[in-house]
């Protein structure tokens, strides 16, 4: 009898332990569920109540959206990664990804940039009234009296042609801001000028730095410093003395330095500002980088191919390059490719310049070619890419460190071929790759080029979806990050000032960085 009772107690004890273990396990799982749920994305934030929520993109139905890796699905079968992945077909997707800039491909009217009129975000820009010697005075425009800006309703100051035009970005942006103040302005505006700097999203510095370098970088024999250097020094003194600069340490300022050698002396002192650049080839990463700054396209110098009815069979040249072959730095690839390709049939690879109808010859050559080489030279980028786009000649980009304009909203792999330098220099690799691209694939990329070409057009007055509007939209996408850094820098400003009053030393906002 005692043994039976002991056996029964053992069974009850084991059942109790099993039940207890089950309950503890369930509670443990539930506790982890609630912990993970609490760390997920909060659902109780009304983004419409956030300050400056206008800078968040709104979709066509008005919902606020934020940019993340989910916004852009990676393409796994395009030509840019043929070295690593083979045997996959390129997905048929728009070359332009819908994201913050809301760039859409419309089969009826080409590329449409921006949202519907009622939802369009407009960047508010405060522009300094710098003396004319910093901008239109460099174009030999003569100001009368105290007038700072030309009357753009009557006549625009002419910008010099040739290769000067490729870095003329500051000219077009300044004109667009001035035009935004005209009552009868019909042009599109992604940015408008405001005269109260505290209302502005960004503060624009209208210094024609590229033109200043091209025209005035050589010192007069009677002077120790060139006009280019003197104007940079004066600009630094002016900006650092302004209350707007002191208030933000320069973080909310926008400066165009598109020519690689422009602003060469001042850039080390004005680095907190956002730069508009062609690339980062001659900038250390702590001075300029893709997170802080904006990459803008070159203005193409060859003539656009208007009403293009050409096709794969009517463009006789397979691969085209004309330009300087022997370059410094990363440009050695050009020299090596010249020796690899110079004897290939239907390949044009020759030295060329703007002298002796060089631009006219390049226009004819690109318009008659299926593919156009864009090879790194002294810097990662060149105007040749945008000449190719204007020619509807599929660009072949061989530049490992290149950064491309508005690449957060434009998928270049849909209309460009990317080849790593080390692969391009392998014997027969590049030519075999190009010859493997058939008529159908080339035609698809050709259509994409016609869709996106307007994104790289500079003009006055500016039009919806052109380069001027795209650059302003790219700047607008930088504003939230600028605001975040500014707000975080001010966290301890009050206590910092109080703690240092005893030493009679109050730090300037620039020290907060």
Image (tube, rainbow, N blue to C red):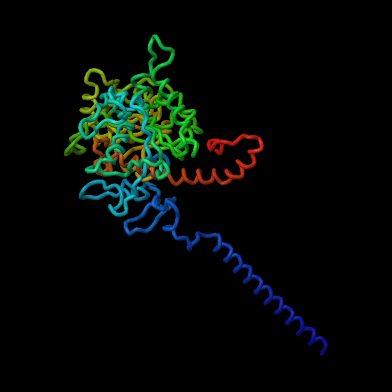
The furthest residue to the right: 2
Where is residue 165 shown, x and y percent of the image? 29, 27
Name the image quarter holding residue 221.
top left
Classify 52 as above or below 351. below
Total label count? 0
Where is residue 75 shown, x and y percent of the image? 38, 47
The furthest residue to the top: 222
Q: Is residue 189 left or right of residue 495?
A: left
The furthest residue to the front: 145
Camera sees residue 436: no
Say which quadrant the N terminus sits in. Answer: bottom right
Q: Is residue 181 left or right of residue 203?
A: left
Camera sees residue 462: yes
Where is residue 513 shown, x and y percent of the image? 55, 38
Where is residue 48 shown, x and y percent of the image? 41, 58
Foreground of the two, 94 or 10: 94
Who's the residue at 30% across and 51% down the image? 115
Name the image quarter holding residue 355.
top left
Who's the residue at 26% across and 28% down the image? 301
Who's the residue at 34% across and 38% down the image? 417
Foreground of the two, 112 or 507: 507
Q: Is residue 58 left or right of residue 492?
A: left
Foreground of the two, 25 or 214: 214
Q: Is residue 278 left or right of residue 21?
A: left
Name the image quarter holding residue 60.
bottom left
């Amino acid at each position: 009898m005692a043994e039976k009772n002991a056996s029964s107690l053992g069974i009850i004890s084991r059942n109790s332990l099993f039940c207890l273990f089950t309950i503890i396990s369930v509670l443990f799982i539930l506790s982890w569920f609630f912990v993970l749920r609490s760390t997920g994305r909060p659902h109780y934030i009304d983004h419409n109540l956030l300050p400056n929520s206008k800078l968040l993109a709104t979709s066509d139905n008005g919902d606020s959206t934020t940019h993340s890796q989910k916004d852009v699905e990676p393409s796994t079968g395009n030509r840019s990664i043929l070295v690593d992945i083979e045997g996959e077909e390129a997905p048929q997707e728009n070359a332009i990804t819908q994201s913050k800039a809301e760039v859409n491909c419309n089969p009826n009217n080409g590329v449409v940039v921006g949202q519907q009129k009622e939802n369009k975000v407009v960047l508010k820009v405060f522009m300094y009234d710098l003396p004319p010697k910093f901008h239109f005075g460099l174009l030999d425009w003569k100001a009368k009296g105290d007038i700072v800006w030309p009357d753009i309703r009557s006549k625009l100051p002419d910008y010099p042609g040739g290769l000067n035009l490729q870095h003329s970005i500051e000219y077009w942006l300044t004109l667009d801001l001035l035009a935004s103040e005209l009552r009868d302005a019909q042009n599109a505006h992604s940015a408008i000028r405001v005269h109260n700097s505290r209302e502005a999203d960004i503060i624009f510095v209208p210094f024609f730095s590229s033109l200043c370098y091209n025209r005035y970088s050589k010192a007069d024999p009677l002077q120790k410093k060139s006009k280019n250097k003197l104007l940079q020094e004066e600009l630094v003194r002016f900006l650092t003395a302004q209350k707007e600069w002191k208030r933000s340490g320069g973080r909310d300022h926008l400066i165009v330095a598109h020519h690689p050698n422009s602003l060469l002396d001042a850039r080390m002192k004005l680095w907190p500002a956002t730069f508009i650049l062609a690339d980062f080839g001659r900038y250390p990463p702590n001075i300029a980088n893709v997170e802080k700054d904006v990459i803008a396209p070159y203005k193409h110098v060859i003539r656009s191919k208007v009403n293009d009815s050409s096709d794969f069979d009517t463009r006789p040249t397979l691969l085209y390059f004309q330009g300087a072959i022997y370059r410094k730095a990363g440009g050695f690839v050009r020299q090596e490719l010249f020796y690899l390709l110079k004897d290939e049939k239907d390949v044009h690879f020759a030295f060329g310049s703007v002298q002796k109808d060089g631009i006219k010859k390049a226009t004819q050559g690109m318009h008659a070619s299926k593919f156009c080489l864009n090879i790194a030279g002294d810097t990662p980028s060149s105007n040749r890419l945008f000449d190719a786009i204007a020619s509807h000649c599929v660009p072949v980009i061989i530049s490992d460190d290149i950064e491309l304009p508005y690449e957060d909203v434009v998928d270049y792999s849909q209309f460009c071929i990317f080849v790593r330098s080390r692969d391009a220099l392998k014997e027969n690799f590049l030519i075999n790759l190009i010859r493997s691209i058939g008529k159908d694939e080339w035609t698809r990329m050709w259509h994409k080029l016609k869709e996106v070409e307007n994104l790289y057009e500079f003009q006055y007055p500016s039009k919806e979806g052109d380069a001027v509007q795209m650059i302003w939209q790219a700047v607008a996408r930088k504003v939230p990050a600028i605001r975040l850094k500014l707000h975080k820098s001010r966290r301890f400003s009050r206590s910092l000032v109080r703690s240092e009053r005893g030493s009679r030393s109050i730090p300037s906002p620039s020290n907060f960085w």
